[in-house]
Every structure is written in structure tokens, then in C-alpha cells.
Image (tube, coloured by chain):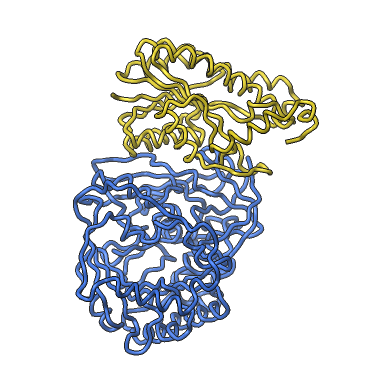
Amino acid sequence: MQQSWIILGATSSMARAMARRLAKEGATLFLCGRDMDDLAATAADCLARGAVCAKALLFDARDTDTFAPIIERATAEEGVINCAVFVGSMPEQDAIDATPELIAGVVTDSHIGPATFLQKLAPYIEARGQGTVVGVGSVAGDRGRIGNYVYGSAKAGFATYLSGLRNRLTRAGGHVVTVKPGFVDTAMTWGIEGMFLVASPDAVAGDILTAVARKKNVIYTPFFWRYIMLIIRHIPEFIFKKMSI
Amino acid sequence: MAWNKLTYTGWGRARVASGLVARPERLSTLTRDLTETRAPAFGMRRSYGDGALNHNGRAYDMTRLDRVIAFDPATGVVEVEAGMPIGDLGRAFANKGWIPPVMPGTGFATVGGCIANDVHGKNHHVMGSFGQHVTAITLIQGAKIRKITPKSAPDLWQATVGGLGQTGVIASAKIQLMPCKGDMMVLTERRIDGLDDFLVAFDESRTDYTVGWIDATATGARLGRGILEEGEITSGINKSRDAAKSVPFNAPSWALSAPVVRVFNELYFRRVPAKGRTSVKPITEPFFPLDAIHNWNRLYGKRGFHQFQCVVPMDQVEMLRAMLTRIGTSGLASPLAVLKKMGAGRGGYMSFPMEGYTLAVDFPNRDGAEDLISELTDMAHDAGGRIYFAKDGVASAAQIAGMYPDQDTWAKAVAKADPERAFETDLVRRLGLRDSTGAA
């Protein structure tokens, strides 16, 4: 059966890598984001690599008016409708300290926007009785840390949303995969000091698609982050609050 | 925008640079960044020496700009971002009946690098150089973005193709692909007993793809012995997935020592039966024989290695023989040595190819290797030949004077395109290429 994928935040390198892999499998792709030139290039690339159809569509997490046209276009396709969410934004914590109003944007980009979109999409997945949602969170959402707790809190909220959505879609035949990447070699981490065990976007995309095929619920990628975060989550708060990690 | 302080090397790992590197993921980012900061661009850094390095300066890593932007199935013209590896392009289109007409010995080289070095392939005698199949280039020269074709800006075009990135950052390019029957190759391999037999074999060869592996450790009567590979693209689709292996860490220094290489080469020579053999393989294997082993440069240990590549005119066979003799007795040769007959095709002022024989040999970066390469460079010069900048990390400005007759014309065009020398690289500085030396 034809697989269609809505990819939100398709200008990110992880999303691009996943789109490429899906293209090789002959999927139909709706590449959504704000930089239309860049999305058009990715769409052309996906077509060259085997996608049945690849369209660039405008998506702005802060503008809910952009949501309906995407859902309308994607649900016009027959077959399975899937959605992968890569959107999010992470200003420097210093910038947020200076301008706390930035928090609204971070939470909208990483949680409110995508959750609103998925809420609109969910009935269609239920109606078709199949379809997978991939939500990309972050290990930063597992525990609030001094370096990026605003971003972390937005991702934590989104992870909880995904957990509930999984609870809902599972009973209708759908599925939700929560992805928690560790450090990935993207524009976001380029030049940041202290990065280690950095994974390539393509490796992360491969892990995600394996998780989709095996109907995993929550994955860490690369896998060892599960154990790193297991330790970090279990540090008692009275110690953790004095740490800078 | 993020500038990352990096220490990075050419493929041979014998030349090192440290400096700030940006890695834009979108064309809009690259365009914006270049208006503020003009600096040279590099791709996969498959140039062996310092062609992709800018020590104590800035550079753009283009590897994230690696997409097909447009493809016209009627004409076979494809437009790609400059950071796309050429092997990727081959794999994406071969099953649609199109293939890049020229591919270098590694599929990891990016399209931008293929243009900037005007690379050649095993079919140079038939199809010429890579730049001859490029129909348009998007060049970012700072705030100015130019879309050029060979007709719209002939001087700038000739200075850009094979121009080592000195006219600006190549952001994207249109390439005329070549129709092909499939993505398999019929490959015939046979032993060749010595240099003279090799030259005869090249003359008699009628295949599109021809290359000779040389046992560079052989001396005396066996001097120049090796294996001739002749290939033709054939129909059939390769269904096997590329399963690459990787060299996980630096090999010890004895791994490619003289006795090991001698034994390896003997076995490699005998691998092909005395009566020769013919097989059908996925095109990636004969095209990119070493790509199946990622990071094979680590086999040379942490000091790295150099490659020497030159081309000498057809009538300079005796000089070729002298070079092989010198290499054979040096005890420095590695298993990788390649001989090929070149045609005249070249795309720009500073393009490497000329009609003649091209010889490429890897040397571990041990004591004496640089002196030997220097000697070979002088021999190439005396023969009226030239060395290949994509491989070089050793030569001096004086040694290469006169090798490239159009160097002055190129230097003038480059001075016009980049008067502030913002795009200079370590190689261009070392060889003083832009200092308009004049033909010697």
C-alpha cells in the first residue's frame, strides 16, 4: 500500500536524511517548513532518488493557518498517511535569560505548533485505521538542566503529548514513535563545544525507520543514550541541582 | 552562524590545517554567510595534499549541500548542489539510464571538487575531462552570485573549471549526463609483463574504460608489469547493496613497508589468471575500487601518505621508464600505482590533462618520500609534462613553473574575480599560482 509521509521541519538535516531514505522506498512525501527554496531542492532530490511524489508545502509552527492545507493535500492521497515531526527551536539559554519573552516561541515551535497539527491529523489516521506518527523530542526533555531547560521543558511537554497520542491512536490501529536523539551532527550542534558521541543525521534516520517498522514506542538514538539518560534521570535531585552537565 | 574551530587534513593526511569552518545546510545560509565572509570551500577533502586546506583562515564545508536540484529526463541534464558526491549522482541515475560521463577514481569526490580540479576518469581518452560536460555553474563571489555558462562568460568559465576554487565558491552546477545501458560493467583483466607491452596494449585497446595497475616495486625485466583493466558499461541493474567496510584505526608503520608491498603486489598480479579473465560487475566496483573500504587512508598510519601524479607527452616513454626505475629502487612504493593513456580533453586554463601517459603512485609519508616526489616532479617538468594539483602536497613554485602554459591567463582572470585573494588555499599559496609567474 502506498505510504505517504508528512514531514514537518523538513529543512533539518535529520528530516532530510529520513526523506531521502523514504524516497528510496518509493514513498510519497510532503516536505513542510518555511524555507520554500530549500524544500523545493529537497523535493527534487527525493524525486531523483525514487519518491513517487514529493511536494514542498509551507508550514510555520507559529501560524496555525498553514496546517489545514497540508492535511488536506496529504489526505487526498490514498493509502497510509504518516507524519514525522522534526520542528523545534533552541535559542541560547543566555538569550532567553536576557529576553524571557522568547520562551513563547520556543514552546510554540517545539510543542504547541506540532501538537496542534497532530491533533488535527489524528482523526484521519483513526479513520484509515493505520498510520504512524514520529515525534522527535530530545534527551534534553528527560531532565531540566541549567544549559537548556526552556528547550528541555518544551520537548518534555511534547513527549508527554506523544505518549497520550500513542494511547489514543493505538486503539484505532495507528502508532506513535517517540524519538529522543542524543547529540546529532547538525547545524544546531555545529561549533558547540563539549559534543561527544555525535551521530550522523543519516544514522538517526535509519534508527527512526527501523523503529517505525518494528512499532517501537520510545527510542533513544544512538541507542546508548537510553543508558546515559537512565543514569542522569536517577541522580537524586539534591545532588543534581548542584551539577552542571 | 557557527564557525567551528577544526583541525583538518587532505586525503593523504600528510598536510594539516587548522582554522574556522562553517558548514551551511541550505543555499540561503551559504549565500548569506559568503556576503559577510568570503573564504574558500571544500567538499569531501579527497584532494591528497593541501588543495582543500586553508590554514589559519576560514573555509566552507560544502558536504551538507548535496542534493539534486533538477533533472530533465528528456535531455539528461541534471542540476546538483556542489557538495554532492559524484558516486551518489551515479547511483541515483544509472538505473534511469543516465550516468555522469566522467567519474574520478573515488565516488566520494564532490561535484564542486570535480569541477575545481577538472578531474578525469578511466575513459578520458574517449570522453575528456569532467569540466567538458558541465553546462552551467552557479558561482558565489561574495555578495555577487553569478550563473555562468561556457558562452556567457568564457574567460571566467575557463578560470573556474580546473581553477581550484579561486574564482569563487561553486554552489551548484548543471551536468550533461550520458545515456547508459545499465549500471553493470563488463570488465576484462589481463596481465601485462612490462612497460613496453603496456604501451602497446593501450594503443590496441578499444574499450571506453581503460586503466593499468602497475607493480611499482618491479624492476629490471619486469619493470612496468601490471594488469590492464578494460571495461564497457552493459545492461542489467545492480541489486546488491553497497556494504562498505572501514579501516577503524591507524595501521602500524610496517603495514606498508617495502617487503610487505612486494609480497602484496606479487599476489595482486597473480590474482588475475595468466590467460586473463572477464567478469560482469556493478559499475561502482571498477569505478571506485577503494571506496568499499572507508578511511583506507588510515592504512598508511598516522603520518599519512602522498600521491604523485604526472602526465608526460606521448614521446616521453624513456622518461616514464626512468621514473618507474627510480620508484622501483626507492623501496617507498605502495601497492597503489596506476598508468593510463590520456587524451587531449581538458576544460579550463589550469586543467591537468594533456595527450600522453599519466602515472600515479602512492608513497607512505616516510623519510625520503618527499625528496623522491620532488625528484619525480623535476623529471616530469624536464619531459614537458605536468603534475596534478589534486594530488600534490610537496612541489614548490619554482618546480612547476612552465608546466601550465595558461597560468598567466588564469592568474589574470582570477585576480579580476577575486582581487582580495579571499579564496586562496594552502596549495595555491605554496605554489604561488596566483603570482603570475609566467611560463618558464
Image check: A110 left or right of B163? right
Q: Which chain is blue?
A: B
Q: Position of residue B162 (x, y in %)?
A: 43, 61
Residue placed most toward the observer, B81 or A111: A111
Q: Residue at x 60, y 62 (%)?
A: B16
Residue B357 showing in the rendered view: yes
* Quarter of the image where the C terminus of chain A is located: top right
Q: Position of residue B338 (x, y in %)?
A: 37, 72
Q: Residue at x 38, y 41 (%)?
A: B68
* Quarter of the image where the N terminus of chain A is located: top left
Q: Where B55 sits versus A116, above or below? A: below
Examine the image and state in which quarter residue A238 appears: top right
Q: Where B221 sits versus A211, above or below? A: below
Residue placed most toward the observer, B204 or A218: A218
Q: Position of residue B154 (x, y in %)?
A: 40, 56
Image check: B333 left or right of A76? right
Q: Which chain is yellow?
A: A
Q: Position of residue A112 (x, y in %)?
A: 58, 16
